[in-house]
Amino acid sequence: MIGLGVMGRNLLLNMADHGFAVVGFDLDSQKTSLLESSATPGTTVKGFNTLAEMVQALEKPRKMMMLVPAGKPVDDVIQSLLPLLEKGDIVIDGGNSHYTDTLRRVTFMEEKGFHFMGCGISGGEQGARTGPSIMPGGDSVAYKDVQPILEAVAAKVNGEPCVAYLGKGAAGHYVKMVHNGIEYAIMQLISETYDLLHRGLGLDNDELYKIYKNWNDGELQSFLVEITRDIFLKKDDKTGNRLVDMILDKAGAKGTGKWTSQDAMDLGVPIPVIDIAVCMREISAYKEERTQAAALYKTSSSDIPVPKEVFIQQVQDALYFAVIISYAQGLAQLHIASKELDMDIPMPQVVKVWRGGCIIRSSLLEIFFTAFQKNPALPNLLLEKDVAQLLHGKKQNLRNVIIHAVHMGYPVAGLMAALSYFDAYRSERMPTNLIQAQRDYFGAHTYQRIDEPGTFHTEWNK
Ligand code: 6PG
């Protein structure tokens, strides 16, 4: 393991716990010491402070993974490794690299006779230690060599490991990027429900805990709802208040959500809930401007005109609906990207791997897994009958929640984006005939007709 930060150390210790003799490298001797001191007694774990020593300690062909920050650090590691490697050695990038960087590195390393794989890993530090979801792609020969290790350390669902070969080229990092896009979307949606229940209904953290607990015990069961539940109970050591109330409302972002949106735009795949999630984090960063605008556009808040229990149920249904739409958008992007970027992504395997260990794991993924097993070429989850059934039952409450939120002036852009996407996607006829007319009017861009084939242009103002 190259890079013994929290993720690298924990994943390496996880490998050791499964009977593999492992070595790790980090320049920082405190990190190598911590690695060795936190190893389970009886396991074989050794830390080195030079890359050469670490490489020499490995059996050939060497199997190495790096978990270092995306970008230049990955290229730096590759450059440092080059003089130390022999033909057939395997290097895996387990970080959140941009897939185009991975493609470039795969070609570069292949030309030199080395195997290079991009591999998404999800689950945070706890996941790395006890069982992450692992998304490898690229060199399928190298995958066979590391498969037993990855299968041993991955999370298990129904006894099956949450790891699978996910396609050619940079498929592993592409799938992880879209995973993170969906992660952004679901987090945004949960934050909107929190706002409606907290500011809108005036519920306190104890009441919120109970609501999210109920949701997590039911059909909304998922890692993100589960941790949201627990966040409401956490006390702040400094003030004794609930910690969530003491946290500044400015969201950070390392970029994977934005990359998902950028790439979807390039591919022409609409993923508006993910786009909005990125935008809302951006708006949150403008705290000072928001504070000025809040004073300028102050409105008196009014109560939601529905009984509390009824509204809570409506919000639950709205979240359920919009979460399904978020997965549908991300998976539709993978479906298209698989073909357009020549990755051959096995969609049932993607959904299978996401069922456990990762940040977007959720009981919904079992339903989606069944859908993709039936039809691996399913272009959009919304076309699957079982999913349609789920959405039918919830759509009215999503509309109800949006109506109340709009009346009261609460921002619910994620929920609205989910509903608008749904309403557009299920429209056999969209108003884009008018857009075509406008384009042809001012730019002679031509249009097609509904009653005969061909391309037409009209002199509109004659
Ligand atoms: C995971 C997470 C992980 C990381 C996010 C955070 O799957 O374990 O997605 O990769 O926590 O990249 O992303 P932001 O900093 O952009 O929110």
Image (tube, rainbow, N blue to C red):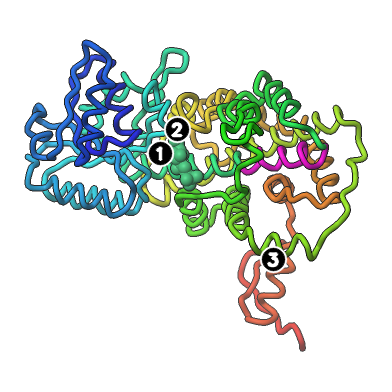
Residue 243 position in % (x across, y down): 61, 35
Hey, which quadrant is residue 228 in on the image?
A: top right
Looking at the rendered structure, which numbered label has been put on residue 350? 2
Circles 3 and 1 in contact, beta carbons < 8 Å: no
User: Please, is residue 93 above or below residue 36 in the view?
Assistant: below
Instruction: From the viewer's perspective, tell me whether residue 368 is left or right of residue 404.
Output: left
Residue named by callout 3:
449
Residue 307 position in % (x across, y down): 91, 31
- Mark 2 nearby-residue class (10 Å; few <14, some 14–19, many ≥20): many
Earlier residue among tags 2 and 3? 2
Dot 1 amino acid type:
Ile
Query: What distance separates the C-alpha of mark 2 from that of mark 1?
Result: 8 Å
- Mark 3 nearby-residue class (10 Å; few <14, some 14–19, many ≥20): few
Secondary structure at badge 2 equals helix
Q: Which of 19 and 230 is in front in this view?
A: 230
Residue 247 position in % (x across, y down): 60, 43
Instruction: From the viewer's perspective, tell me whether residue 3 is left or right of residue 376.
Output: left
Dot 3 amino acid type:
Arg
Q: Can residue 135 be seen in this view?
A: yes
Dot 2 amino acid type:
Val
Q: Is the magenta stretch mostly helix, strand or loop?
A: helix
Circles 2 and 1 in contact, beta carbons < 8 Å: yes
Q: At 81% across and 52% down in the image, what residue appears?
A: 409
Residue named by callout 1:
345
Earlier residue among tags 2 and 1? 1
User: Please, is residue 450 above or below residue 157 in the view?
Assistant: below
* Range shown magenta: 188-201
Q: At 24% across and 34% down in the image, what residue appears?
A: 30
Mark toward the viewer: 3 or 1: 1
Residue 13 position in % (x across, y down): 28, 23
Query: What distance separates the C-alpha of mark 2 from that of mark 3?
Result: 40 Å
